[in-house]
Image (spheres, rainbow, N blue to C red):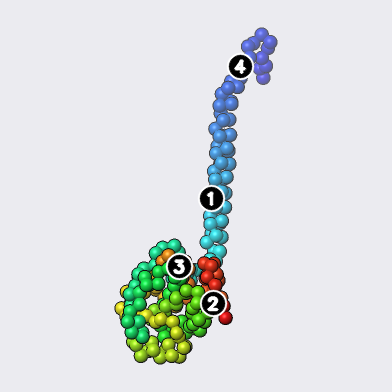
Amino acid sequence: MHEPTSSEPIAPTDVSSDRRAQRPLWHLIALNIALLAVLASAVWLALWFLRQSEVPRPAPSAGDFLAAQALTIGTVAPEFTLPQLDGGQISLSQFRGRPVLVNFWASWCAPCRSEMPALQQVATQYAGSGLVVIGINQLEDVPTVQGFVREFGLTFPIALDRDGVTSRAWRVYGIPQTYLVGPDGTIRKAWVGPVTEQSVTRALDEMGIRPTPS
């Protein structure tokens, strides 16, 4: 076995070439770590979105849909001129300067029937305060409407929307539907579904309208 003597030159080691040989290995490890991190993030996001999609959310109700179709608060109420049950015609504009409660109804509508006593009570209590209540019947014949009025003892004006044009102009796609029109002719309040005496009274109170002292 030959051993180099002190007089024989020792071949130098190429350190730089060893480092270059090691670099691809470290780069590969770093790249794999980065890819694993990206993959883990993608899996976490996928699971998060999956959980979110499984959270039960209530579907919009028919009432929500109809309310969204109603006339916007603050807009000018559409004018109408309709035949009145007792004869003659009735127009919204003839009551300009007074608050008007406009109610759309039909005799076959159970919620309409349930709210009629409240509307009659409001009409009676606020008669001396300038409030006008107008019931607009949808597409029914005169005898049917007359029977309904007698049944509930209604004393406020009843108009007949025989062709449905007024109901469409007022964006009535379900009944009952009620609007409170201010003295300036703008929509102040809208109800989709039956009103109560309390809800109407509260809206009138917000407008500064008080019931007639008994």
Secondary structure beneath dot 4 equals loop
Residue where numbered disc 1 is placed: 42
Secondary structure beneath dot 1 equals helix
Secondary structure beneath dot 3 equals loop
Mark 3, mark 1: which one is toward the viewer?
3
Residue 138 placement (x, y as % from top left): 37, 80
Dots 2 and 3: beta carbons under 8 Å? no
Q: Is residue 199 visible?
A: no
Q: Amino acid at mark 2?
A: Thr
Dots 1 and 4: beta carbons under 8 Å? no
Q: Residues within 10 Å of mark 4 (few under 14, many from 20)?
A: few
Marks 4/2: CA distance?
114 Å
Mark 4 or mark 2, earlier in chain: 4
Residue where numbered disc 3 is placed: 182
Q: Residue at x 36, y 85 (%)?
A: 86
Q: Residue at x 36, y 68 (%)?
A: 78
Secondary structure beneath dot 2 equals loop
Which labelled disc corresponds to residue 212?
2
Q: Is residue 163 visible?
A: yes
Which labelled disc corresponds to residue 12?
4
